[in-house]
């Protein structure tokens, strides 16, 4: 009964209206910014390279601009890049990858705007730390009438984190290590919980330090392995791109274990999995960017938009292209199993390990990144006294997630994720004039 009701709600909140709202907001912001996120891509990379190291930065904040991006990337680079891309292609065909790219391009404008507002409207808490995110730019930017909207975001964010950012990630790692090395689920859960606890003891600065090293290392390793496969099969790349662009606009016929897909399926699953992967519009990433040491919301915004580019245009593309050129997309497999099959068929005896270790590290860093998001949401609702109890609950949820059957939790978390987006998108649209003015003033200087 409850499952059916939540399933119906999920179909509603992730239906065409939500996808149009998220994409539409991105298009509106991109036009209002006069294509700045695309035109200033090089500038974004330059700001990112200059944002390494706390001591070099000017302004207030707690972590370097680079580590703020790594913290937000730690939460977005995860199962979405490995299992999510595979699911999109399984359900929507190769054309789904094209629609993931479109989602990422407009998502860059969304992510930029979120970070600009997060830094511009951030506060200092009673511990002296800079805090911000949708709940704060709703409260400080839209005024007292909208405080309930900020509280709604914080409630959805705190609850969603235990699903999408914790138990589901622990379960993915436990599944991967169990099938590859026969390690019991509970053992994996306990080990991850201990590691997470050790990091959380140090708060935002230790989380940022750990993910600032782990995320670049794992992302570069994963991309290099995928690049190696693509170079070895370079002659198949033109055909792969032909499949992607053809099936983005025409139905994909059934072949092998692939059931076929209409154009609407390619759009729907490409957009939905793209959003699931890069989280543009959900309002999670600006919580991390609000902690950056900076005196310019716009400069941090240009760094934030690189997260969507790295996550979807680079990492998701690597997974998708390997799945397509290997021919594994017609195998009938889906999720992480499909990605593993694709890498293994291209790199026999080695490829599946790339996926297993990639998934494990990405999921671990996602648990760390989302712990910060959940903590900030709880702090907004109950004050800093709620942080320690939250951290204890967060650590305890990890082994529970590793051993649980998660179909119901996945459904609830996916629904809460969409509900997070609604207050955030309303705030982005209403506060867009602030973003446009700050951007014009910054670049005119």
Image: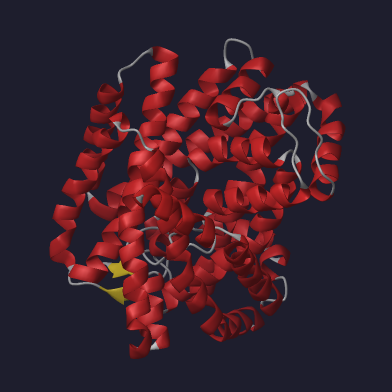
Does residue 283 show up?
Answer: no
Which residue sits at x=76%, y=46%? 262
Q: From where the camera sits, is residue 96 visible?
A: yes
Name above or below for residue 395 compared with residue 106. above
Give residue 369's position: percent from left, percent from top: 37, 49
Above/below status of 71 relative to 305: above
Above or below, comparing residue 36 to residue 55 in the picture? below
Question: What residue sits 70% from the left and 28% below the top?
Answer: 329
Q: Find residue 215 and report its horizontal and vertical position in percent.
A: 46, 41
Picture coordinates of residue 109 (x, y %)? 62, 67
Residue at x 72%, y 71% (from the top left corner): 35
The image shows residue 191 at horizontal and vertical percentages of 25, 28
> 366 or 208, which is in the foreground?
366
Closer to the camera, 71 or 140?
140
Give the side of residue 428 with respect to residue 99, left or right: left
Instruction: Tell me the quadrant of the picture where the C terminus can be found.
Output: bottom right
Left or right: residue 307 versus residue 125 is right
Residue at 82% x, 35% y: name it: 253
Horizontally, residue 291 falls left or right of residue 425, namely: left
Instruction: State which quadrant residue 188 falls in.
Output: top left
Q: Residue 210 appears in which quarter of the rendering?
A: top left
| Image colouring | secondary structure
The extreme front residue here reads 1
- Number of labelled discs? 0
Q: Nearer the viewer, residue 402 or 42?
A: 402
């Amino acid at each position: 009964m409850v499952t059916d009701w939540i399933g119906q709600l999920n179909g509603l909140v992730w239906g065409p209206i939500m996808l149009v709202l998220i994409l539409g907001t991105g298009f509106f912001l991109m036009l209002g910014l006069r294509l700045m996120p695309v035109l200033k891509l090089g500038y974004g990379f330059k700001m990112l390279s200059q944002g390494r190291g706390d001591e070099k930065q000017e302004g207030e904040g707690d972590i370097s601009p680079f580590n703020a991006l790594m913290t937000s990337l730690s939460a977005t680079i995860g199962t979405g890049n490995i299992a999510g891309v595979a699911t999109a292609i399984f359900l929507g065909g190769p054309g789904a990858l094209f629609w993931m790219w479109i989602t990422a391009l407009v998502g860059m404008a969304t992510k930029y705007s979120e970070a600009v507002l997060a830094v511009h409207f951030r506060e200092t808490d009673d511990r002296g730390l800079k805090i911000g995110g949708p709940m704060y730019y709703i409260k400080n930017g839209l005024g007292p009438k909208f405080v309930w909207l900020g509280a709604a975001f914080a409630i959805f964010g705190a609850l969603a984190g235990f699903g999408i950012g914790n138990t589901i990630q622990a379960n993915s790692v436990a599944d991967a290590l169990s099938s590859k090395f026969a390690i019991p689920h509970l053992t994996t859960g306990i080990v991850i919980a201990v590691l997470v606890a050790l990091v959380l003891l140090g708060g935002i600065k230790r989380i940022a330090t750990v993910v600032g090293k782990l995320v670049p290392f794992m992302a570069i390793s994963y991309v290099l392995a995928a690049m190696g496969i693509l170079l070895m099969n370079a002659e198949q790349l033109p055909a792969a791109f032909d499949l992607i662009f053809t099936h983005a606009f025409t139905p994909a016929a059934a072949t092998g274990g692939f059931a076929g897909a209409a154009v609407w399926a390619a759009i729907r699953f490409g957009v939905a999995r793209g959003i699931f992967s890069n989280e543009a519009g959900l309002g999670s990433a600006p919580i991390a960017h609000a902690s950056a040491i900076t005196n310019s919301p716009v400069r941090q915004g240009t760094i934030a938009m690189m997260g969507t580019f790295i996550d979807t245009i680079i990492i998701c593309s690597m997974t998708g292209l390997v799945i397509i050129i290997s021919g594994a997309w017609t195998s009938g497999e889906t999720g992480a199993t499909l990605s593993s099959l694709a890498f293994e068929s291209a790199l026999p005896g080695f490829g599946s390990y790339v996926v297993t270790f990639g998934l494990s590290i990405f999921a671990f860093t996602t648990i760390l990144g989302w712990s910060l998001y959940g903590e900030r949401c709880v702090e907004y609702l109950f004050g800093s006294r709620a942080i320690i109890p939250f951290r204890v609950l967060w650590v305890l949820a990890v082994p529970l997630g590793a051993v649980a059957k998660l179909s119901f939790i996945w459904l609830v978390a996916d629904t809460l994720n969409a509900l997070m987006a609604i207050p955030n998108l309303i705030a982005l649209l209403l506060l867009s004039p602030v973003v446009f003015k700050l951007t014009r003033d910054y670049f005119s200087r």
